Image: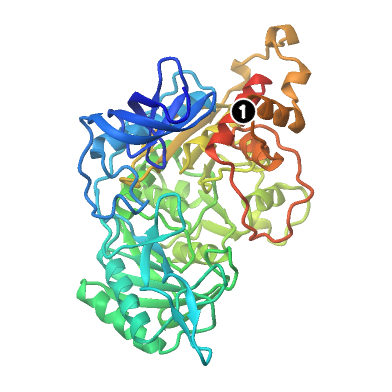
Amino acid sequence: MEKGQFVKLKIDDMTGDGQGLGKMPEGPAVFVRGAVAGDVVSVKLTKVKKRYAFGQLMEILKPSEQRTKGFCPLQEECGGCPYGKLTYNAQALIKEKHVKDALVRIAGIKNPKVNEILFNPVKFHYRNKATMPIWAGGIITRKGGVSENLGEPSIGFYRTKSREVVNCSECMLQQEPVTAVSEAIRVFMKSDNITAYDPKWERGLLRRVTVRTSAETGEVMVILVINGNGIPNGAKLIEMMDSAVYETGYSLESVILNINKDKDAVYGDKNITIAGKPVIKESVCGMNFEISPLSFFQVNSVQMENLYNLVVKYADLKGGETVLDLYCGAGTIGLWLLNDLRNKTHNGIISERAFETTRVLGIESSKSSITDANRNAVINGFVNARYVHGKSEDMLPELMRAGELKDESLRVKSADVVILDPPRAGCREDLLQTVVDAKPEKIVYVSCDPATMARDIKFLIKNGYGFIEATPVEMFSWTGHVETIVLLSKLDSKNHISVELTMDDMDLTSAESKATYEQIQNYVLEKYDFKVSTLYIAQVKRKYGLEVRKHYNISKNGNQKVPQCPIEKEEAILDALKHFKML
């Protein structure tokens, strides 16, 4: 195979960003944008490596039975719905396959029990939060120092593999207030000459807008991220947005200015309430929550109920347990568990005493989320839930460490159940070790990334926990993302024996298990004819659960943008790791 060659290809799978993936009978895997699983396509190879290639879709020779025309007029431009041309069932089953593949390939579990994916009961307009960049083609300064936009204001989502903003007049995933607010801002920007932020020159005012919506309460929050301290004629904009939201049947209850003068950060640290309340109310399955601008809350409120009920099933609390809720966000999972227990007391299943002696302790790095979590505990009438501000990696060891604590009621001697709900990057290994040290009988892992989930599960399996089962949950229809709930259980050491293996048995030498970064770089350069940085090697090793040395030259700027390893270099590094038998 060589660059420029035309090949016929059957597409068997799809990547998370929507590329079709096929494999030649005696050649590398080929990534094809625009192809979907089941297609037979004619492809022109644009980039060829030894283990993979990229191709340009030239013709669909036989369309997949699961291919559709799609549902969005912007689907060829916007990168928000990479699975938008598949039937719903097909895209859900691909995600289920991705979860199973990650558990086999990365976690090393043979025949993992993966239950059928839980379908999303609401396929469209299911998101309760949208964050959209604002762009107007750049800024020009006229005589007299007046700055103007070079083009028309665009508010929407990024084009695939680009930072170009696609102007979205409507989105099938978002609720109506999002469209209404966006159009009000466009009109305001033109009428009052309000500039959009230009990252090249770090000038311009409006950077992005976030709209949070509650379908249950009808409340809407608008967060305007600005490169400044205020918006000229801001009262006019508030009135325009209020009228637009009202026309959709909702109520604008909160308008927030987020001050962000950092080029690379999505949000700044300072929030100013310029209209209404600093929070909005959400209600799910009889529970009430207050949500502040930057707090984490599941974006699919309807499917959230099914997700959390599955956590309840896996945790299987009887009363009297200590539950650690790590990366707890606004406290929703821990409070959901307590609410289920309280309902069991009302039904006579457990005693009041069993409920009262159950303890939930949550840890979260977002200060606003912790404020929300403790307030939500009060709103829902729970006195046995406490939420602490700090990174889980730092705070949990501190609460478990011997010695005096300022608040002894927060001490953790052990745990019965640990809930892990990390961001896409997964858990740090030192946190996982601390969780193991807490000796919980069960670990319930809530994941939004199958690869990092499988990496973390691999560590937990090596340290005394057994994988029981996983259930994918379809939270993000038409995108490549999937939520997964995993149950792990502590193995009974009395029923397990240690087996000593010699190095001959393992067929692994110390040199093979400890290949240096330079050896990996040389292997990649010789085989693939391109260089890889130590940063990229470390990212791939960390992703697949391998030990990574400390990086002493890391920038002191915590918001510095770190380049991410491209897929072709990740594949090459993976090949090197397998060559040296590190995977």
Horizontal side of 34 relative to 54 (left or right) equals left
Q: Position of residue 382 (x, y in %)?
A: 45, 59
Q: Position of residue 358 (x, y in %)?
A: 50, 48
User: By what rule are the colours in the image chosen?
Assistant: rainbow
Looking at the rendered image, the quarter that the C terminus falls into is top right
Q: Position of residue 520 (x, y in %)?
A: 70, 29
Extreme bottom residue here? 144
Q: Position of residue 469 (x, y in %)?
A: 43, 28
Q: Is residue 325 above or below residue 229?
A: above
Quarter holding residue 285: bottom left
Q: Is residue 444 above or below residue 223?
A: above
**Residue at 40 percent of width and 89 percent of height:** 233
Quarter holding residue 216: bottom left
* Residue identifier under label 1: 528
Q: Is residue 502 visible?
A: no
Extreme top residue here? 504
Quarter holding residue 156: bottom left
**Residue at 53 percent of width and 44 percent of height:** 420
Q: Give, as a three-letter code, the residue at label 1.
A: Tyr
550, 490: nearer the viewer: 550
53, 435: nearer the viewer: 53
95, 133: nearer the viewer: 133
Q: Is residue 116 visible?
A: yes
Q: Is residue 97 above or below residue 389?
A: above
Horizontal side of 87 relative to 253 (left or right) equals left
Crowding at dot 1, Cα within 10 Å, few <14 / some 14-19 / many 20+, comes out as some
**Residue at 41 percent of width and 36 percent of height:** 15
